[in-house]
Structures are given as C-alpha cells and as structure tokens.
Image (cartoon, helix red, strand yellow):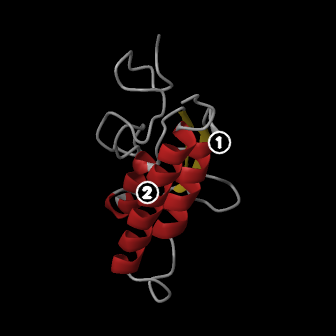
Amino acid sequence: MTTPAGSGTGFGSVSWWGLSPAVDLQAESPPVGPDSQADTEHGTPELNVLLLGSVDGRHLLRTLARAALWPQRRFHFYVLENNLEAVARHMLIFSLALEDPKKMGLQGKGNLNTEFRIGVWGYLRRWEGIGEET
C-alpha cells in the first residue's frame, strides 16, 4: 500500500508537506537564452510549471522568492492535487505569503499560520473519533 505521496507504508495517508527540501524550479528549468522564444504580447520568456500531487506549495514559494536571482520570466503555475485539503492548504499559504505587509506583518502571518495548523489538528483529532463504537 502506498500513501498519496507514494512514499510507502508508515507515513500515514494524509500528507501535510513534502518529504524533500523546497526546490527553486528555475534552477531546474532550461536557462533563458538570448534566442529563447519570448511571449509575443509581453516580450518576456515564460516558465510553465506543472506540479502533480506535490502536496505542498513550498517549491512555488521558493521559486518566487528567488526570482530576482534569475533573468526575468513570466510564471505560469499549474497545480493538480488528488484531495481538496491540499488545494486549500496551497491557497492559504499563498494568501498569507502574498498578503500586503501593510495589512499584516510577518509576525501576524506566522501567528495565523500556527493558529490554523493547531485548529486543523484539533479538528482532525475530533473527526477521527466520529463513527467509532465505544
């Protein structure tokens, strides 16, 4: 039996994050050359990324965070997950990370992320007992 992350038995059936370090996807992609085909509308090369069942958005966040180290590109991220919880987690992480710093500072973002994870853990613990006979 394999888990959704394909890691085998012993890791459970719910993946909260990946089992590898975050990767800068631009470092793994072909370099932008002077003869590369640029987007005709914007004149900027594109990077199209498809993530299938990656379970977390750390790779996308790292790629965006390190974008200034590389030649300018337009990003198109496509994410496909097999469960809705992973998609909701991606959306939450990105909404926190991309929130305007004037509206919410770094400490507030960290606190909200922690509160979310603790709240979800409590919800799952309560939900786990539903349907069990005592």
User: Considering depth in this image, is 33 or 7 the residue closer to the camera?
Assistant: 7
The residue at the far top in this view is: 1
Q: Residue at x 41, y 58 (%)?
A: 118
User: Considering depth in this image, is 66 or 12 the residue closer to the camera?
Assistant: 12
Asked which secondary structure carries label 2, the reply is helix
Task: Kindly identify the amino acid type of the residue bearing the numbered disc 1.
Answer: Leu
Q: Residue at x 37, y 61 (%)?
A: 65
Crowd band around label 1 with a 10 angstrom C-alpha radius: few (<14), some (14–19), many (20+): few
- Residue 113: x, y in percent? 42, 65
Residue pointed to by mark 1: 84
Q: Residue at x 40, y 49 (%)?
A: 58
Residue pointed to by mark 2: 117
Quarter-wise, where is residue 41 in the image? bottom right
Q: Residue at x 38, y 72 (%)?
A: 111
Task: Kindly identify the amino acid type of the residue bearing the numbered disc 2.
Answer: Arg
The residue at the far bottom in this view is: 102
Q: CA distance from mark 2 to mark 1?
A: 16 Å
From where the camera sits, is residue 75 visible?
Answer: no
From where the camera sits, is residue 1 visible?
Answer: yes
Q: Quadrant of the C terminus?
A: top right
Crowd band around label 2 with a 10 angstrom C-alpha radius: few (<14), some (14–19), many (20+): some
Q: Is 36 left, or right, of 28 in this rendering?
A: right
- Residue 70: x, y in percent? 36, 56
- Residue 59: x, y in percent? 41, 46
The residue at the far front in this view is: 134
- Residue 72: x, y in percent? 45, 60
User: Considering depth in this image, is 121 or 40 the residue closer to the camera?
Assistant: 121
Quarter-wise, where is residue 19 in the image? top left
Asked which secondary structure carries label 1, the reply is helix
